[in-house]
Amino acid sequence: MDKNTPQERAEIVTIFIENSLPRKTTIYPLHANVRQYGMAADMPRSGRQRTSRNAENVALVRDSGAESQETSIWRRGFQLHISASSLR
């Protein structure tokens, strides 16, 4: 069996990607979105959004970790009055 050079392999992959067709599992949800919403993009998800995990809280916990590396993230959140669920 002849081995292809890296450049030849890259060309083969490029040709495959350009010529391959998407699967039904990709097309059907996109088609359903277009029919229902008029666009292929996903609609926003319903449900409660996390509001307590923000850049400020993340930085606060991270900075407190620089001072004391033995303290767990959960314990730091407790000390900073940040709920454990927002530290995930």
Image (tube, rainbow, N blue to C red):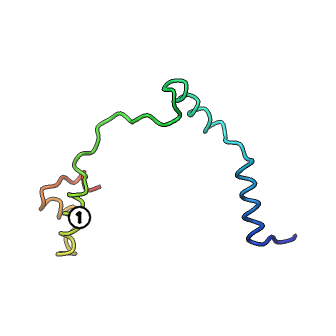
Image quadrant in which the C terminus is located? bottom left
**Left or right relative to 17: residue 47:** left
Q: Residue at x 78, y 72 (%)?
A: 5
User: Which residue sits furthest right?
Assistant: 1
Indicate the quadrant where residue 64 lies: bottom left
Point out residue 65 in the picture as x, y percentages from the top left corner.
Answer: 21, 71
10 Å crowding of disc 1: few (<14), some (14-19), many (20+): some
**Left or right relative to 12: residue 40:** left
The image shows residue 47, relative to residue 79, as above or below, that is above
**How many marks do you count on the picture?**
1
Q: Residue at x 21, y 61 (%)?
A: 74
Q: Residue at x 17, y 64 (%)?
A: 76
Point out residue 68 in the picture as x, y percentages from the top left corner.
Answer: 18, 75
The image shows residue 5, relative to residue 49, as above or below, that is below
Closer-to-camera residue (39/87) = 39
**Left or right relative to 30: residue 64:** left
The image shows residue 79, relative to residue 40, as above or below, that is below
Say what secondary structure mark 1 lies in. Answer: helix
Point out residue 31 in the picture as x, y percentages from the top left corner.
Answer: 59, 30
**Left or right relative to 13: residue 40:** left
Indicate the quadrant where residue 12 lies: bottom right
Point out residue 29 in the picture as x, y percentages from the top left corner.
Answer: 56, 33
Amino acid type of the residue tagged 1 in the rendering: Ile
Image quadrant in which the N terminus is located? bottom right
Residue that label 1 marks: 73
Q: Residue at x 22, y 54 (%)?
A: 84
User: Which residue sits furthest top?
Assistant: 36
Closer-to-camera residue (25/44) = 44
